[in-house]
Image (cartoon, coloured by chain):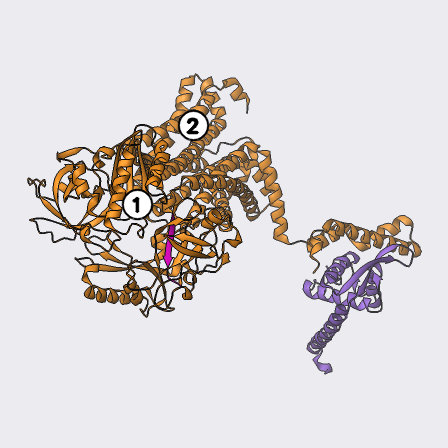
Chain colours: A orange, B purple
Amino acid sequence: MDWLRFFRRKRWDEERARELDTYIEQETADNLARGMSPADAAQAARRRLGNPTIIREEIYRMNTIGWLETLWHDLRYGARVLRKSPGFTAVALLSLALGIGATTAIFSVVYGVLISPYPYAKPGEIWSPSIRDLKHPKQGRGFYHPREYLQLRELPAFSAVMATSPGAQLLTGDRSPENFQSVYVTANAFDFLGVAPVLGRTIMASDVRSDGSAEHVIVLTWQAWQRLFDGRPDALGKILTLGDEPCTVIGVMPARFGWWTSEGGWLPLPMTTRDDRNAAPIVRLKPGVSKEVALDQLKAFHQQLAQATPADFPKDGFTTILDNYLDISVASGQMQSSLRLLFGAVAFLLLIACANVANLQMARATARAHEIALRMSIGAGRGRLLRQLLTESLLLSVAGGVLGILFAIGITRVIVVLMPAFYVPNEARIEVNGYVLAFSVAVSVLTGILFGLMPAIRASRPDLVDALKDGGRVSGTGGAGGRTRNALVIVEIALSVILLIGASLTVRGFVKLQSLDLGFQADRVLMVGLQLPPKRYATYEQRINFTQNLISSLENIPGAQSVAIGNGGLPFGGLQSPFSIDGHDSAESRRITVGLISAGYSRTLGIPLRAGRELTPQEVAHGDHYALINETAAKLWPAGESPIGRRIKLDFLERTDLGALPPPNASASVTVIGIIGDTRNSGLRNPVSPAAYVPYTLFAPPDRLVAIRTQGEPMLLLNAVRQRVQSIDKDLPVIRPNTLDSVLGLQSVQPRFNMALFTFFGGLGLFLAAFGIYSVLSYTVARRTHEIGVRMALGAQKEHVLKLMLSMGGRLVAAGLVTGLIAGLAIARYLKSEIFDVPETDPLAIAGVVSILAVAAFIACILPARRAASLDPLTALRRD
Amino acid sequence: MGVMPPRDAHPLSGEMLQGTLDLLILQTLVPGPAHGHTIAHNIEHRSDDVLQVEHGSLYPALHRLESRGWIASFWGTSENNRKARYYRISADGRKQLAEHTTRWDRLVGAVNRVLRPAEE
């Protein structure tokens, strides 16, 4: 079939016209030959042919696809109608663009972070086994010793098992020394993940020798390749000195591949039982094997291990967990629930926008009643009219959607900036991509139907006689239409109240977090990390000497007030050690946080001493078995019993398998000499953990964290600190320099993210709802101009009119507010999300919502009300 | 549209008549190309004026046949030196004609057998 004819109909039609002309000429000529008069001949010819217009129309129709033609007509008509009322169109487009844009933006984040965060092959089929403490389900382990891993690999349910052991190594060579993320993976890792390198090769089975030791090869991340080799292909075969070992670069991964690191590299994990590097395994199941079967096998395996080596398993029993990798790794916990809530919030926002546009449509439909009645009376069917009106709505929503996508691109950029990086997988890419676009197109179309259908059905059912009799005057259909519009406004207000409740709770939570008593003074503290290469610092003495030299060197920096070592407690974390209190049986496998500190710890952080005394520098230097505990730890002793002078056993101080070296006189028992104030040592939003602080000389790990309290801006001292470190060891980099303030800032990134987005969307919702109130009241004023004129003519004062209009708006607002508060509190209670740090009935939050809404609603009401009050009765009456 | 039924008769099913008109047009074009005017008169003439075609209705039929590829058109000069649109039958059209003629013959035979059983 010749498709072109659909587009060349005009030419076709001209040809047909000419062809028919030819017929007339021919037939006329024949008639003349038969002896007719010229006039008769022409007339007879035309009679013989029939009506040429009808013939041409018939052919024209043959060249069209019916519904497409109608659609095109409707679209053109719709566009004309929308152009003719630019005010309505602009407002509707703005509402839709905001609603669809917000939804699209959040969807692009949800898509990038939750739905498709990974470039890996079938990420939904990866499982991660772990062991959890029966009594403390938050404790446990997901790491396995190579000995365990080799057995785990043999379980029949698994088709593939790979393991990862993260870490960092010192990178030396031509450039200044640095700490380089070195992730050890089993040889099958890249096959397992199903990602090919952009350059060279990945780690292969042959990179692990038959005795289990590994070749010195490294696959670089894209970032490392760019940074170390400027992205040159001749990086392959180059040697990097990692932890004093030469390491050959064999490949480079694509930019989006970020398995446990996106700035370092991957090395083959040695597979010997002598190696004590623990690794986290992930598995794929054999086809047809269910998760339950796999879990049963894993349980049996753990039982077997626990019998053989009980020390490696929790004392009070354990449970076996097999998690889907997406569930544990994708934007863990908070981010996930905050994205879900945000998605709900923007859905509400979209509903508000829909209600708004539906409202405007209905108001306009009333004004257009005459036009519609006219079209129906000259024969337009109801279906045809419905289609016309719906097409108009769809045109509007799709145009709004296009604007919305532009808006979404903007918001998405802001969201990415606000987003706490550590809650989002390395590999996640947040962008407005094809899926997101498809989503927003679908949303636009649905939106168009949602806000267009009801007004269209209503409009296509007018009382013809009335509408026509009205003569096109704005008619007073105050009844059913008015009620629906009022209901829509109430819904809008209620929805925006719900959004505002969410926003106010996040604001309250954030403020609460900011005013939290930390237990220490966070300002003017510089923190740097140090990692001693274990090979060069192989003995306890070497490590302790370095640390002692460093402290005394740093204390002499001008501007440094005090210096402290704190492995643990700077300001968070520390070794989680099992413990027992002398004279008290502790049956439970509770843990205590252990901090390895120098004498200046409490002074540097500004933690007050509550009882007893501080550690002296001499005691620290000697490695005396003394400890400070925090107030929470003091409560581990029975009430009335002072812990000072009592002994506590910290099991980890005797462990040698953690990469740390014990002193010659190692003992796990320490005597409590003082109690210091509680600090928020396990995160700002978590309760304080019991903690014990012992001299750093009791345990020598290869890494140290140093804090320096400064007189002025802490970062200004960084260069001096670096010089002092490198004057002791020129190959030692200073890792992650930071201020204590910004470390704390990281803790509030997520709450700030929640607050920013909820507030933003809440504000948008409020704006749209206020606009809904405004448009309904304005419309009412316009509709009741005549009535108001009569009232004023009969003696009503301006104040009366003002009051009349305000009370009308007030009723709507009050109804919406009450509905919204009830629904919002019910939803908040039901969700019980960790996003909200304060109870949902927080009076300040509710008061805030009510007052903000009241102000916005008042502004939205007063403008049209004043317009009504300032009507000149004469003009108002003359208008009809 | 299609073949005009006798004045007092009820119109027959449009589809059947439409198919018949197509058949007649194709048959008319077998001897050689012709323009619309000739085709109309030809059909009328050859049916001894029994089949009164409303000449206008011929043109949509021609258009339809052309879009199916059974006939092709070109602009030519008519016998009295005017530009006219000529139609000629295509190979596909000839095949369709043969097929439809057979079908028509069978139909006519069947109808006749029903109407005049005595003659058999």
- Give the left or right position of residue A301, taking residue A181 as reference: left
The secondary element bearing badge 1 is classed as helix
- Give the left or right position of residue B114, taking residue A200 as reference: right
Residue A846 is a magenta residue: no
Most extreme residue toward the bottom is B120
What segment is highlighted magenta in the picture?
A179-187
The secondary element bearing badge 2 is classed as helix
Name the residue type under label 2.
Answer: Ala
Secondary structure mainly formed by the magenta segment: strand
Name the residue type under label 1.
Answer: Leu
Q: Which residue is mark 2?
A: A860
Dot 1 crowding, Cα within 10 Å, few <14, some 14–19, many 20+: few
How far apart marks 1 and 2 lie (CA) works out to 32 Å
Q: Residue at x 89, y 48 (%)?
A: A39
Q: Position of residue A727 (x, y in %)?
A: 34, 39
Quarter of the C terminus of chain A within the rendering: top right
Dot 2 crowding, Cα within 10 Å, few <14, some 14–19, many 20+: many
